[in-house]
Image (cartoon, grey):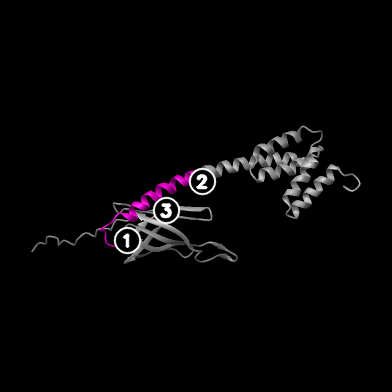
Amino acid sequence: MIRFQQNHNSGLNNLGVECDTLDMPIKSVSYYKGAAERGNTLAMSNLAYCYMNKGFEAEAQELLDKARKEDEPHQNVGQAMSTLAVNKEKEAQAWDKITTEGVKQKEFFWAYADAYFLPSDRKLPFVGQWASPTGKVFTISQEGDSLTAKWETEKEGEKFEGTVHNLAAKIKYEKKGSLGLFGRTGWGSAQEGFAYLSQDGSLIHLHTCEKRTTLFLELKRKEVEEHPTNESSPTSG
């Protein structure tokens, strides 16, 4: 087509598509631009996707607004405009989530640093029964600077183990019950994380972050139940 008509806009657009398929983005964009300059609205939408995929929102929006004003714009123009709006909203939501979690991480590691560097005279500070906000009860044991923690049912469970330094610990966290090829499986892969004990010894704060998945967990120490002493009752002779 290009051989017979050098500036055929559909041919230029199709060459852009093929170059994109062949991982030749520079030539692909060049052909899209050539077709777009000749009024091909499909090429305009293709070029707009190139822009938006690299974050050039204003350039993509300007191109799509121009394409929309053409006579009988290609249906992909409307789809590209919708995609741009959806992508902007997704990024706005992701940004809010990331910045919120970033503040939580900053506050966590400030407190973790205090727990790690400030000396403590507590003996085996993590030992005991600890409850999560959802009622899961972790049993934590500690031998020297090594700790293990676990709660488990037949189908679910969580556990972590790590190395203690003062009132802080570097841990590996695992979760049971992940969905596998044949249904529910056992323990999943371990995630690196951190934990620290509050200064009054009543709370453990735990945090893991892997593959953009973050976990913040707070465990509250369960009070040891006091058993009443057996007192003899008065008897009559």
Q: Earlier in the sequence, mark 3 or mark 1?
A: 1
Residue drawn where x is 76% and y is 45% of the image:
30
Examine the rendering and report whether any part of residue 66 can be seen: yes
Q: Secondary structure at mark 3?
A: strand
Q: Earlier in the sequence, mark 2 or mark 3?
A: 2
On the rendered structure, is 147 left or right of 69? left
Q: Which residue was labeled with disc 2?
A: 98
- The crowding category of the residue bearing disc 2, from other C-alpha atoms within 10 Å (few below 14, some 14 to 19, many at least 20), is some
Q: Secondary structure at mark 2?
A: helix
The residue at the far left in this view is 237
Rounded to the nearest whole Å, what is the CA distance between mark 2 and mark 3?
Answer: 17 Å
Viewer-side residue, 31 vs 78: 31
Q: Which region is colored magenta? A: 99-125
Residue 142 screen position, x and y as percent: 33, 65
Residue drawn where x is 66% and y is 40% of the image:
84
Label at residue 217:
3
Q: Residue 131: within the magenta?
A: no
On the rendered structure, is 123 left or right of 190? left
Q: Secondary structure at mark 1?
A: strand
Residue 52 screen position, x and y as percent: 66, 43
Residue drawn where x is 64% and y is 41% of the image:
86
Rounded to the nearest whole Å, what is the CA distance between mark 3 and mark 1?
Answer: 17 Å
Quarter assignment of residue 130: bottom left
Viewer-side residue, 188 vs 12: 12
Viewer-side residue, 75 vs 11: 11
Q: Which residue was labeled with disc 1?
A: 128
Residue drawn where x is 91% and y is 46% of the image:
4
Type of residue at label 2? Ile
- The crowding category of the residue bearing disc 1, from other C-alpha atoms within 10 Å (few below 14, some 14 to 19, many at least 20), is some
Residue 169 screen position, x and y as percent: 37, 59
- The crowding category of the residue bearing disc 3, from other C-alpha atoms within 10 Å (few below 14, some 14 to 19, many at least 20), is few
